[in-house]
Image (tube, rainbow, N blue to C red):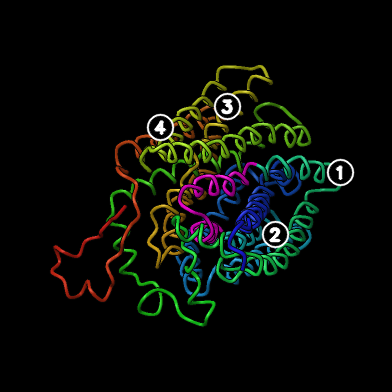
Amino acid sequence: MPATRQTHVRYLILLMLFLVTTINYADRATISIVGAELQNDLGIDAISLGYIFSAFGWAYVLGQIPGGWLLDRFGSKRVYAASIFTWSVFTLLQSFVGHISTGIGMAVMTLFLLRMMVGLAEAPSFPGNARIVAAWFPTAERGTASAIFNSAQYFATVLFAPLMGWITYSFGWEYVFVVMGTIGIVFSLIWLQVIYNPSDHPRINRAELEHIKSNGGLVDMDQARSQGGGGAPGGGPKWAYIKQLLTNRMLLGVYLGQYCINAITYFFLTWFPVYLVQERGMSILKAGLIASLPAICGFIGGILGGVLSDALLRRGNSLSMARKTPIVIGLCLSTSMIICNYVDTEWLVVAIMALAFFGKGLGALGWAVVADTSPKQISGLSGGLFNTFGNIASITTPIVIGYIIAATGSFKWALVYVALNAVVAVFSYLVIVGPIQRVELRDVRELGDQPKGQQELKSCN
């Protein structure tokens, strides 16, 4: 293989991560875009809709640790491909709810179960993203790479919210699920043709592989699996490893921060289009278009956060300073959404929400932190545990907001609730997390031979 000029296969891999995450978040957002029409068509109240919004989160959270284990055991390529195909099938099946359900109760139950299956199938996705970025990108490029795939959640709204709003307006809400399910099924086949381990990819040359490997990329992460090997030492990740992760103060602070950041995400992903229709009196078509504007700002903020973080790192700042600075600044900006409670002008409300979403995007560097800190032998499991804590917010946020709206008749206190989550996330990163550094695990076979006081989790730079 030529060694003089590098290939840039890692950027193709990053494009695939960006596209799959766009489809991932578009499928999550389908129910929110059609939410107002569902309420009218099926007679669903606000509390029931909140539970339907949360159904994805219940299964998604429960599937994180098993999903991470599957990634570590069988590798990212096969597990992720199966994940894409399966969640897309269950997305498509939601189009039949109006035809097979009789009565409001049955409609709610059917939608809840199908949304749960989408959540369960999507569970390996973000731990898989983090594993692939850790394998394909050097440390100094990892923040930008993580920010790019994570920013796809905003791009999904920019691209698909107007499209789904138009489909709902022109053809009916059922066709949104048909279109999105079909797109995902096709993409799962493309994924199998493009994704490989760094050392196995047919288009990479030695120069790029050495660049990645010598600068912190974990290029051999899935090598044992591609050769028919197993997972982590001892035949796969052990529950004792999880105990070690859960006793690390830095990781617990990161987990709390991610829960709060995801609370902001799931407000925009679930209730925000409903807020525009019910609180601000917009049509479903207009709400779909307007919802894309803050998402554009979130996308810009998401990319900028990663670029700023890596730039700080290249200028000699510590990893902790480089990662925390955009997080704290961004989350402080996201609290601006409370101002919407005191203004009535439509364009000003949209502008404030755009600023809040920009800030949330700027501060959404949790997956870069995971790639920086996860132990090599259980990176999938570590990412799954991180995502478990973070996505508890996908359960609680839609339900809490549903009850707030039912109790108060407006979104005012809902916005306060979401903004307070940003404040808690800032506290967590400034006070609890401490130095950001890669975790080094003790082998589970060694722990049984050590006195209890020495069975501690070690960390290294």
| Near-viewer residue (350 or 439) | 439
Look at the image and tell me in which quarter the N terminus lies.
bottom right
The type of residue carrying mark 3 is Leu
Q: Position of residue 47 (x, y in %)?
A: 57, 44
Residue designated by label 3: 355
Contact, CB < 8 Å: mark 1 with mark 3? Answer: no
Magenta part of the protein: which range?
A: 125-154
- Mark 2: amino acid: Thr
Marks 2,3: beta carbons within 8 A: no
Question: Which one is earlier in the sequence, the residue at label 2 or at label 4?
Answer: 2
Point out which mark residue 423 bears.
4
Of badges 1 and 3, nearer the viewer stands 3
Secondary element type, mark 4: helix
**Are the residues at dot 2 and dot 1 in contact (C-beta closer than 8 Å)?**
no
The answer to which of 147 and 413 lies nearer the viewer is 147
Left/right of residue 410 with respect to residue 64 in the rendered view: right
**Dot 2 corresponds to which residue?**
91
Q: Earlier in the sequence, mark 2 or mark 1?
A: 2
How far, Cα to Cα, is label 2 from label 3?
A: 31 Å
- Looking at marks 4 and 1 on the same chain, the residue that comes earlier in the sequence is marked by 1
